[in-house]
């Protein structure tokens, strides 16, 4: 379905580069295998030949903007629904202004991947997607699509919510035994946009490079709290994790708690919205007063 | 977790506990520490070698041994970060953990019988001092000795006793000092080290040049030396990289395929020209 | 050779467990790594492990020594020696080759790392010969025959139903003696070798790279890298480590060493603020030059065994075989090519 968009995408990207409206276009190109893609950095009109749009374009290109925010001139990037929420996140966090980016919107009918047995399955991160269409865009290629199962946004929490709290802690720490602290989750997350992450930066030794229960819990829980209310639920963190940690479970649990406390909320769906944790309304609950 | 046979071999990652026996305030941000162990000198380094000083509950870092006596080692430490802040707070009698010696040291054999020109800037005099004092202790093995040294202000000059008292009294030993910015009492030269060097214009004939200092000073000094006709093989300097293990295993301090802690920190300019520009 | 039906593997491991700690690739929570085998655990041999075998001899986190710090006193306490005899079981030829490189690094050049040596000397290496390559494997391009176990104490053959053990050293023979009653005499044949999908031509690469430090190819190769440490942590030959102290408020603590990655931004950051590798470009270039040029220059081997873990796990599909083929295309005798703006 999405493959037909490739030609239109190439047209748009080529025109932008030829007219010198932007000097860099971020997209996707074929990866090592048919079912993999890699981010593509197009600087000259000829580079556009490598561009593809298909159901394997799972990488979000939004967080690359953190490396290019001081790049001179405008930058264009292809964004799916979740990717555009990442861009909204970065603009709301004042990393750059809306006019720095030219967004080429790609409505997404869901990403796919090959599982262990070589079968084509839906990507885990697309389950429960509420915004397959880009939230902000300058031009849209392709027709808007309907979200497949938005009511499943919190489906992944079901199993844990049925467990007793003590069991939940045990199963969490056992899962996080696997964490090797590669910080891939922090590097890819658009909400993790601190110039120097207190965990990666070792000069203050908030945590060390050691891997054990305390350090892993500290890192994962504090990161979840730091992005609370700002996580756009794009699922990239869980996708990039080399050991398959259930990072989105933690983020979605916090998102659900925020909805329970402050009312219906989704991060990164409107450029002008404020995060419940960064704003105050008279109706906010005040159990502590 | 170690093997039963471990204690038979030297474990290079294992420090020994030492005591600080003297602390000298060289400048507002540099202190020299005299360190000794239960058996006298913690180790016997060659000039230019390094030791890893550790405040066990803070961290450890590599410092050059600036001098040694019969039963002690001296480290000159500039206050730049978390560990050096903590080091500057300790008092005489307190303990430190030390391990070493690491690094290749200065190529003494190449220097025997030659005239030596030492060019230092700021704290860069610290590694040079180990070599200078070695030359003074073995005076007959070396030709004329000439020290050209500069710091930002007169207060920032390190090892003032050596510069103005001890070294000028040695045979055939010339000391020239400059500061970037003088004060009311300073009567010596005012100007940057590279310009001062060109003004002094020491002849390159039969001379080995050893230079240590901040990267920007080294860059201009090397340009000046080239102008004055020095060969790359006759110029020796030290390179600095962040070091952790000190024995060429942890991979951190590599410049190209050299490990600074093992193959360095002393390199000739001819060697450096073959290394990638990543330091 | 001595063979068993694959159903009997647990019996063999059980027997070995009586006198050794058996480390084998075991899956826990979807990730396979070399952990201690116990009755009931299932050894996963159908694919290569996710975490390489270096984690047995060079663990992610390892205690170096303990210390006690008081106002006027400082005490260093040796870590308690653990004299454990190990059987490391199920190492594929790629990981086996990586152990050779780690031996070169930790056991040569003046200093011998006692922590690594202690474990390596006490280990019996049982290698598992592969039936066929996975799509991300390219060990053949790195000079490894996946049906030979060079350097192992025991080579393990498999044909789908049975395992066969061949001792290659005295240590291996001694270990096989202990399971003599469980085995039969039978020759187990490995399946026919198959084609690799991924290939990399590394001939002359190390010498070529020595002149390519400033080549413009590095200006674009690094762009998609996000700078996480996944490739380095999962690479069987990556060996960089950090040394940390962990202190409790009462003044006691311990020094540990743990894996570190040259891809992290503060890897070469010095106390005064100077960082020789300030951006992803320098760190990316350093990683590939270290593996393909610097390690060969120092130890005579390319520090890549073609296991393909970095390719399958990299979130942005940085592919070392692709980098190698790009580097191969560069003509260092063509000045225009060397000056090409990327």
Image (cartoon, coloured by chain):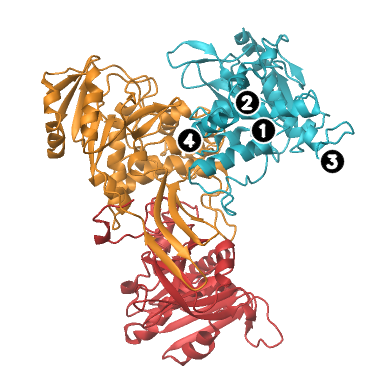
**Residue B197, above or below C124:** below
**Tag 2 or tag 4, which sits nearer the N-term?**
2
Colour displayed for chain B in the image of the structure: red
Pointer 1 residue: A190
Return the x and y of residue C79 as percentages of the image width and height: 36, 55
**Tag 1 or tag 4, which sits nearer the N-term?**
4
- Report the chain shown in cyan: A
Colour displayed for chain C in the image of the structure: orange
**Residue A149, above or below B172:** above
Residue plotted at (64% across, 35% down): A224
Return the x and y of residue A247 as percentages of the image width and height: 58, 29
Residues flagged by tags 3 and 1 on a common chain: yes
- How far apart are labels 2 and 1 at the CA level? 9 Å
- How far apart are labels 2 and 3 at the CA level? 42 Å
Q: Which chain carries label 4?
A: A
The circle on residue A177 is 4
2 or 3: mark nearer the eye: 3
Residues flagged by tags 4 and 2 on a common chain: yes
- Is the Cβ of the residue at disc 2 closer than 8 Å to that at disc 3? no
């Amino acid at each position: 379905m999405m493959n037909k968009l490739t030609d239109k995408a190439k047209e748009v990207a080529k025109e932008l580069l030829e007219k010198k409206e932007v000097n860099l276009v971020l997209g996707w190109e074929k990866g090592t295998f048919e079912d993999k893609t890699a981010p593509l950095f197009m600087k000259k009109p000829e580079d556009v030949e490598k561009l593809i749009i298909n159901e394997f374009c799972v990488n979000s290109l939004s967080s690359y903007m953190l490396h290019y925010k001081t790049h001179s001139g405008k930058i264009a990037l292809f964004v799916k629904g979740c990717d555009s929420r990442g861009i909204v996140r970065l603009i709301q966090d004042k990393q750059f202004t809306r006019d720095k980016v030219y967004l080429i919107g790609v409505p997404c009918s869901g990403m796919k991947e090959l599982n262990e047995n070589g079968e084509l399955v839906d990507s885990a991160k697309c389950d429960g997607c509420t915004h397959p269409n880009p939230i902000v865009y300058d031009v849209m290629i392709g027709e808007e699509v309907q979200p497949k199962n938005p009511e499943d946004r919190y489906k992944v929490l079901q199993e844990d919510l049925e467990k007793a709290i003590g069991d939940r802690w045990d199963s969490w720490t056992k899962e996080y035994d696997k964490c090797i602290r590669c910080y891939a989750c922090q590097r890819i997350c658009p909400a993790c946009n601190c110039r120097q992450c207190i965990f990666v930066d070792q000069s203050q030794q908030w945590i060390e490079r050691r891997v054990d229960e305390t350090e892993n819990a500290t890192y994962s829980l504090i990161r979840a709290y730091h992005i609370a209310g700002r996580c756009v639920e794009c699922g990239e963190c869980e996708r990039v994790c080399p050991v398959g940690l259930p990072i989105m479970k933690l983020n979605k649990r916090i998102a659900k708690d925020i909805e329970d406390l402050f009312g219906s909320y989704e991060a990164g769906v409107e450029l002008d919205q404020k995060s419940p944790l960064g704003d105050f309304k008279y109706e906010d609950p005040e159990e502590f007063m | 977790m170690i093997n039963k046979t471990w204690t038979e071999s030297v474990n290079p990652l294992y420090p020994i506990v030492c005591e600080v026996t003297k602390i000298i305030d060289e400048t507002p941000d540099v202190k020299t520490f005299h360190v000794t162990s239960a058996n006298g000198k913690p180790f016997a380094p060659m000039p230019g070698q390094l030791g890893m000083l550790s405040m066990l509950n803070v961290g450890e870092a590599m410092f050059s041994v600036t001098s040694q006596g019969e039963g002690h080692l001296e480290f000159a430490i500039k206050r730049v970060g978390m560990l050096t802040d903590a080091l500057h707070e300790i008092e005489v009698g307190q303990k430190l953990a030390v391990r070493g010696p690491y690094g290749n040291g200065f190529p003494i054999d190449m220097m025997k019988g030659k005239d030596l020109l030492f060019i230092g800037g700021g704290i860069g005099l610290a590694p040079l001092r180990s070599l200078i004092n070695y030359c003074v202790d073995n005076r007959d093995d070396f030709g004329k000795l000439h020290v050209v040294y500069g710091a930002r202000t007169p207060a920032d000059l390190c090892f003032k006793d050596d510069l103005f008292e001890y070294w000028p009294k040695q045979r055939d030993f010339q000391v020239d000092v400059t500061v970037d910015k003088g004060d009311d009492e300073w009567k010596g030269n005012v100007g940057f080290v590279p310009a001062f060097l060109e003004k002094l214009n020491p002849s390159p004939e039969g001379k080995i040049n050893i230079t240590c200092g901040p990267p920007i000073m080294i860059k201009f000094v090397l340009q000046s030396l080239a102008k004055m006709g020095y060969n790359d093989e006759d110029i020796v300097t030290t390179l600095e990289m962040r070091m952790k293990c000190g024995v060429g295993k942890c991979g951190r301090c590599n410049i190209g395929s050299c490990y600074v802690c093992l193959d360095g920190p002393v390199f000739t300019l001819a060697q450096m020209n073959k290394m990638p520009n990543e330091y | 050779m001595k063979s068993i039906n694959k159903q009997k593997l647990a019996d063999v491991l059980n027997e070995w467990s009586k006198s050794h700690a058996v480390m084998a690739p075991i899956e826990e929570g979807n990730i396979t790594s070399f952990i201690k085998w116990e009755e009931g655990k299932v050894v996963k041999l159908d694919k290569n492990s996710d975490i390489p075998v270096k984690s047995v001899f060079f663990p992610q986190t390892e205690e170096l020594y303990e210390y006690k710090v008081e106002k006027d006193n400082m005490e260093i306490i040796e870590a308690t020696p653990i004299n454990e005899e190990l059987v490391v079981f199920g190492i594929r030829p790629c990981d086996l080759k990586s152990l050779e490189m780690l031996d070169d690094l930790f056991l040569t050049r003046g200093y011998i790392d006692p922590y690594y040596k202690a474990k390596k000397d006490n280990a019996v290496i049982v290698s598992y010969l592969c039936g066929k390559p996975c799509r991300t494997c390219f060990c053949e391009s790195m000079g490894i025959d996946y049906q030979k176990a060079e350097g192992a104490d025991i080579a393990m053959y498999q044909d789908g139903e049975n395992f066969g053990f061949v001792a290659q050293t005295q240590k291996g023979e001694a270990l096989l003696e202990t399971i003599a009653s469980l085995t039969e005499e039978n020759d187990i044949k490995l399946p026919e070798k198959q084609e690799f999908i991924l290939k990399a031509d590394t001939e002359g690469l190390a010498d070529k790279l020595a002149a390519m430090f400033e080549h413009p190819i590095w200006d674009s190769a690094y762009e998609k890298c996000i700078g996480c440490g996944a490739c380095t942590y999962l690479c069987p030959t990556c060996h960089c480590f950090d040394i940390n102290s962990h202190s409790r408020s009462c003044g006691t603590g311990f020094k540990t060493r743990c894996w570190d990655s040259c891809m992290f931004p503060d890897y070469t950051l010095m106390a005064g603020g100077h960082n020789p590798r300030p951006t992803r470009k320098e760190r990316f270039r350093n990683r590939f030059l270290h593996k393909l040029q610097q390690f060969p220059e120092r130890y005579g081997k390319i520090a890549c065994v073609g296991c393909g873990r970095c390719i399958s796990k990299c979130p942005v599909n940085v592919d070392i075989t692709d980098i190698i083929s790009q580097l191969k295309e560069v003509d260092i005798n063509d000045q225009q090519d060397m000056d090409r703006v990327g």
